Image (tube, rainbow, N blue to C red):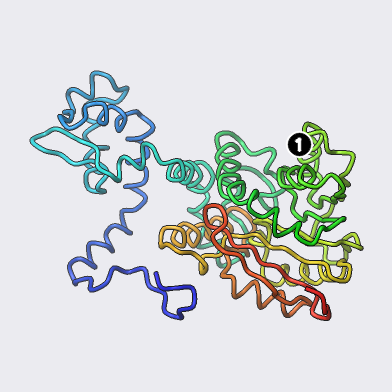
């Protein structure tokens, strides 16, 4: 993938020949089949058994003696895994490839597989209809809510665990590295919009014993955050502010030195984000900052990060809100600057794939 300053973005391998391009197209056509078979090879223990066989490898007959699947089922799964480069076969004996090793041991890969299978897979059948209506029509595969956010605490298992594992794996990796820039100007009052579980608020309150923090979120999410703060022993310096940010007439609490949003704006349409920015600007004290921590696919070093982020967008369409996505940073910056804010700082490469944007009010002379 090109540098962050480039206008040319391309994921296709360079100089791909005609037959090779056709093969890549077939991988797309059969992608769901490959996903399910490789996942089954992992979850059933087949990949682990093949790894135990080491370089000697294992035959289907040998694998069937210690697997719950029949020899027939193992052959179906492993032949697809073979076509995907997850295993290789030499004289009938299967061994693990480097791709298979990632399936078996890489935390990021496993979290992504669980998330796609448990949260997204059934609902993505309704993606085309969701795109046309801009409503999360696939969410009915998990429950009856207008958006997934009203139902997060009530998601059925294993979807609930997989959703929170996915969310926390990405967000938690960047939290610690954001404290120094956010607290450089010693904010006394901070507002955490979309506080979710309250984990970041706890880190802030522990970092600065003089800080007062206000958490904004839906009531059901604030109940979870309150429990987190209570358990951490910092609830007395926190205020809970139940709000539906899509009620554009609802003001935010005023006199804030800092406003914080982490992996929050991706939950909303660009029009709604504009309203959020406008109210955030209005609640700032002079010299205050709006901080946005998010995963912008156009600010990544590596193709793997951009690929994962881009392909999370259909989840927002089919399952979450119907009209949001993983945005490019340029779209968020332009939206902020059209709604009373001015970008003054960008810090990239935080955690796994985060960037931190800092805005001040457009009329502010202090940065």
Along the viewing direction, whichever of 240 and 69 lies nearer the viewer? 240
Residue 268: x, y in percent? 68, 63
Figure check: 45 above or below 347: above
Rendered image quadrant of residue 12: bottom left
Q: Check disc 1 and report the residue beneath it.
A: 228
Rendered image quadrant of residue 203: top right
Along the viewing direction, whichever of 171 and 278 lies nearer the viewer? 171
Left or right: 211 in relation to 194: right
Q: Residues within 10 Å of mark 1 (few under 14, many from 20)?
A: some
Left or right: 316 in relation to 304: right
Left or right: 361 in relation to 139: right
Figure check: 316 above or below 11: above
Residue at screen point 58% across, 48% down:
173
Residue 50: x, y in percent? 25, 30
Residue at screen point 52% across, 53% down:
352
Which residue appears farthest toward the left when viewing the image? Answer: 91
Q: Quadrant of the N terminus?
A: bottom left
Residue at screen point 55% across, 35% down:
158
Residue 283: x, y in percent? 87, 66
């Amino acid at each position: 993938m090109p540098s962050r300053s480039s206008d040319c973005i391309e994921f296709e391998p360079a100089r791909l020949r005609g037959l090779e391009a056709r093969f890549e197209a077939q991988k797309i056509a059969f992608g769901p089949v490959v996903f399910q078979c490789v996942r089954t090879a992992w979850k059933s223990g087949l990949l682990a058994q093949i790894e135990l066989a080491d370089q000697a490898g294992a035959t289907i007959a040998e694998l069937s003696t210690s697997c719950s699947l029949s020899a027939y089922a193992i052959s179906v799964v492993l032949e697809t895994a073979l076509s995907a480069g997850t295993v290789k076969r030499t004289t009938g004996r299967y061994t693990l490839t480097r791709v298979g090793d990632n399936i078996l041991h890489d935390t990021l890969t496993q979290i992504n597989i669980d998330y796609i299978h448990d949260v997204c897979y059934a609902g993505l059948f309704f993606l085309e209809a969701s795109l046309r209506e801009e409503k999360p029509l696939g969410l009915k595969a998990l429950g009856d809510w207008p958006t997934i956010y009203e139902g997060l605490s009530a998601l059925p298992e294993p979807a609930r665990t997989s959703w929170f594992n996915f969310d926390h794996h990405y967000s938690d990796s960047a939290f610690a590295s954001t404290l120094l820039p956010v607290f450089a100007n010693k904010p006394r009052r901070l507002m955490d919009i979309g506080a979710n579980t309250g984990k970041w608020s706890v880190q802030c309150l522990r970092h600065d014993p003089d800080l007062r923090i206000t958490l904004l979120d839906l009531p059901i999410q604030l109940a979870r955050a309150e429990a987190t703060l209570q358990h951490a022993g910092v609830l007395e310096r926190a205020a809970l502010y139940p709000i539906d940010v899509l009620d554009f007439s609802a003001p935010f609490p005023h006199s804030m030195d800092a406003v914080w949003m982490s992996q929050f704006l991706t939950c909303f349409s660009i029009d709604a984000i504009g309203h959020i920015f406008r109210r955030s600007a209005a609640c700032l004290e002079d010299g205050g900052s709006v901080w946005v921590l998010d995963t912008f696919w156009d600010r990544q070093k590596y193709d793997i990060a951009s690929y994962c982020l881009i392909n999370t967008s259909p989840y927002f369409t089919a399952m979450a809100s119907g009209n949001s996505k993983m945005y490019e940073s340029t779209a968020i910056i332009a939206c902020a600057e059209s709604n009373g804010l001015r970008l003054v700082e960008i810090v990239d490469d935080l955690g796994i794939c985060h960037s931190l944007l800092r805005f001040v009010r457009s009329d502010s002379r202090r940065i």
